[in-house]
Image (spheres, helix red, strand yellow):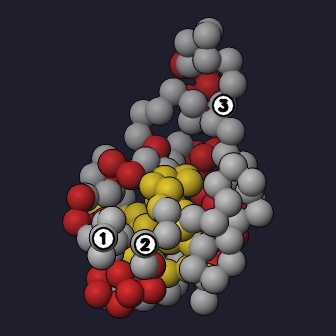
Amino acid sequence: MNAIKIWEGPSVLTGDPVMVIVTGLKTKSTNSKTDDMYQSWILRQDVPPHTAAKTGEDEAVCGMCPLRPFLKATRPAHLSKSCYVKVFQAPLSTWKANKDKPVTPVEQARKLLGNKPFRFGAYGDPAAVPQEAWAAVPTGGE
């Protein structure tokens, strides 16, 4: 098991169903910039990320970020590029593999996660979920 779901519920931003998946439990990222750390993915539960990005339903996890592909027409000239995350790659495979998993209880998740470095929001804005969604993430010294 390389990933667990640590929370699911309504988006703070829109009320749509979202979830938080943490990856990196068994296999470290091949991304040399992130190396061996846990990564959290804030994703719609009911819409694949590549579809959400095309339809604007990614607002539930990205808010009004001006780099959202759906907002390209309204983007200021100095922000000519869209978000660098390729939603049809890691976010989509993470969504497919974990969308139907149950939420791992907080204490069990804390034991699984330990104290390895943690990246909040490999995709999605951590503020899209309530603060209690992060209860399973151990803090230093635990």
The front one of 62 and 4 is 4
Separation of residues labelled 1 and 2 (CA atoms): 8 Å
For marks 1 and 2 on the same chain, the one whose residue lies earlier in the sequence: 2
Q: Nearer the viewer, residue 64 or 140?
A: 140
Front of the two marks 2 and 3: 2
Q: Find residue 51 and report its image quarter.
A: bottom right
Contact flag, marks 1 and 2 (Cβ < 8 Å): yes
Q: Earlier in the sequence, mark 3 or mark 1?
A: 3
For label 3, the residue is: 82
The residue sitting at 74% across, 56% down in the picture is 31
Residue at horizontal 49%, vertical 81%? Answer: 4
Q: Is residue 17 left or right of residue 98?
A: left
Q: Identify which amino acid the numbered label 1 is placed on.
A: Gly
Residue at numbered disc 2: 115
Q: Earlier in the sequence, mark 2 or mark 3?
A: 3
Direction from residue 70 to residue 58 in the image, left or right:
left
Q: Is residue 51 above or below residue 111?
A: above
Q: Nearer the viewer, mark 3 or mark 1?
A: 1
Q: Secondary structure at mark 3?
A: loop
Alpha-carbon neighbours of circle 2 within 10 Å: few (<14), some, or many (≥20)? Answer: some
Helix, strand or loop under label 1: loop
Q: Alpha-carbon neighbours of circle 3 within 10 Å: few (<14), some, or many (≥20)? A: some
Q: Which mark is residue 141?
A: 1
**Residue 139 % position (x, y):** 31, 66
Q: What is the distance, in whole Å, between disc 3 and disc 1 at their CAs?
A: 38 Å
Q: What kind of element bears circle 2? A: loop
Residue most extreme to the top: 77
